Amino acid sequence: MAKDTEKLIRQLSLISFLMAERRPITALEIKQEVEGYSGMNDDAFARRFYADRAELESLGIELKVDKPAEGYYEAENYTLPPENFYLPAIEFTDSELGSLRTALSLLSGEFAYAEPLRLALQQLSWGKPSPLAGPEHRSVALAVTADAGGRELSQRLSKVETAIFRRKTILFDYYTMGRDAEESRKVDPYHLLFRGGQFYLVGYSHERGAVRVFRLSRIRGKVGYSSKAEHDFTRREGFDPRVYATRTDWQLGEPVDTARVWLSDRIDWLVERHFGHAGEVVPAADIDEAPDTGVVFATPYAESRQLISWVLGLGERARILGPPQLVDEAEERIGLLVSRHTGELELAPARRGGTAPRVDPESNGRHETAIRPERFARLVTLAGILIRAARDGDKLDVRQLCESLQVSDEELREDIDVLNVVNFGGGSYVLYAEVQGDTIEVDPEPYGDNFAKPARLLPLEAKALIAAIDLIGDHLPAGSLASAREKIVSALGQDPAGDGLQITTAKGDDSSVARVVSEAIEQRRLLEIDYYKENEDEFTTRRVEPYQLLNGQEGWYVHSFDPERDATRSFRLDRIRSATVTDESFEPRPDVEPDLQGWPRTGEVPASRTARVWVAPERARWAREDRRMVQELVDGAVIVELHFAGADWLAGEILKEAGDAAVLEPEDARAAVLEAAEALAGAARR
């Protein structure tokens, strides 16, 4: 029998024994009565029992230990209070359960935590209809979700999560993009953050003597523990994980100064809504060096290039006013944009081989294998399902159970074999089940009821549940996910997002608009929006039939039908200045569905063209990680491909590269970037 299987049987039997006895139990009794311990000598038992307790604690199942004033571990008494194992009852409304089912059906197969989310929902909907049956009408569609990354990154993420929970200092090799160097790191892991399609670890770096942020896809090799101690550190006072979830790209680090940015009255509302938390806004008329209209945004920054990138991406609608060194750097970068788009850009020769293969997705932390749940959680869930079937006199369908637990027929049989030998002492087994053809028969009189109620959510399951809710956020109707979240946090006794993982996806705060749009979708009423067309720098009023909220590479959209144009249209929520639900209802049209595999996921539309873009050697490392690289040059620069429909959009993307990229072709796109850069240069001189 595999060691992992032996350990699972031993740990489940330990839980069952302690729950059945419901009295303090000595270590000697545990050694004699619990399956898997009796054949060990005293030293081996002491080591295994200690390791099992630590592992159960990391799963959220904590044994109560009564220690004597003095003496050896044999004199300690152990209990497992019911509240340390069973999940408190949570009374969900039909709307809340429906929203949770929707979350699972949307995220299944796409979400880093899809499998533990599935198990968590089965625990929460205990005795109610299966959480796997999604609603007939979906008001939300996902095209870009929290992918786990490759198998190696998934395992890394699981190890980091365990280290956060157990307060274990970790060791790993890390590729620092800015220095182009791989270095060893010793880190006290505090928090995980999902942001912009990537997972980040926030923790105390021993080398730097300060809290730092590490992108998990840049960790090289395995993550190890620095010691064999039960706990290595206590999180430093004053650490607030919410700060890292709300920081902008230019604030991911220690602040070096405060920038003053002028914003035109065309976009001041947009910046205040999405970035107001990152600084202070005052009327431009109150600032001497600013124009008379618009506002001035004062924001602390840690990365000057990131801030300049954001400002340049806003075009002539924004300008840096100070401090002087930031103004100088911005002007220098605008000058680079102009010079690199004037005449013909001189390129270094291509490296031997010329064309570089597309970067393996495994290496940049995107796509492929989702995190598998703890097998322990699956066994506890399966035990409850089998015991309930026995009490109800039901036969279980093998195929349906495999689908429910997302396991193969072979894995299900192995799990049942494990549960059949779990006992609570004295040869009394928890259950006996047998696969007979296409069905499973369970002994109608199981000897124990320890697994007849839903167990507490493991930390991984709780985290998956809250992460799923936070990922979808306010994009389901009626706020049902928000109320479900409150009930779950209350039952757990803590918010997993406050001590483990936070999910942030949108590039701005679109929650207030999302609630209005959701209401219109739910009530089948026309939606009137005041929409900002960024490329044209103008507002337009649209009256549309809203069908779905949809997420894509750039954020959340409302997918709708525009009767005036007799065509489907998708509008970015963060570009909607205001939204109103009208009194006019509409009959849903057939087949108004977004192409989830098309532009929301890839950014390509039928009219897309391909631009060849040169990226400077100092930024090539980032391009290799995030772009489709087609050529590598001997000086370290690379050429990548970008798909675009409008030259104005492409110009905005190149402006964001702050002089470190230049369009090579097509010529009209190159000219569009030059025109935009010269306009910025002229504005800077005024």
Image (cartoon, grey):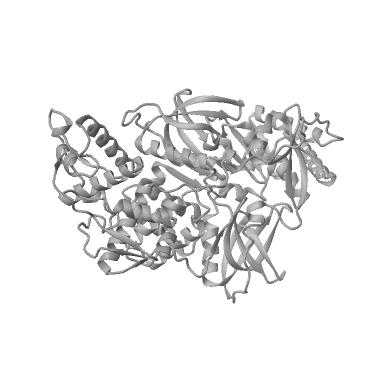
Q: Residue 397 versus residue 603: which sits nearer the camera?
A: 397
Whether residue 246 is visible: no
Task: Please indicate whether residue 240 sits to the left or right of residue 595 in the image.
Answer: left
Q: Residue 227 versus residue 585: which sits nearer the camera?
A: 227
- Which residue occupies 49% across, 64% down? 477
Residue 682 location in percent, x, y?
A: 79, 38
Relative height, residue 516 to residue 507 (above, below) = below
Task: Please indicate whether residue 599 sits to the left or right of residue 389 in the image.
Answer: right
Task: Please indicate whether residue 366 sits to the left or right of residue 646 in the image.
Answer: left
Whether residue 447 is visible: yes
Total labels: the figure holds 0
Task: Please indicate whether residue 564 sits to the left or right of residue 141 in the image.
Answer: right
Picture quadrant where residue 662 is located: top right
Q: The N terminus appears in which quarter of the rendering?
A: top left
- Which residue occupies 51% across, 59% down? 106
Relative height, residue 358 to residue 516 (above, below) = above
Q: Residue 431 versus residue 313: which sits nearer the camera?
A: 431
Residue 615 location in percent, x, y?
A: 73, 35
Q: Residue 356 versus residue 145: which sits nearer the camera?
A: 356
- Which residue occupies 32% across, 53% down? 417
Q: The C terminus appears in which quarter of the rendering?
A: top right
Residue 129 location in percent, x, y?
A: 38, 67
Residue 197 location in percent, x, y?
A: 56, 45
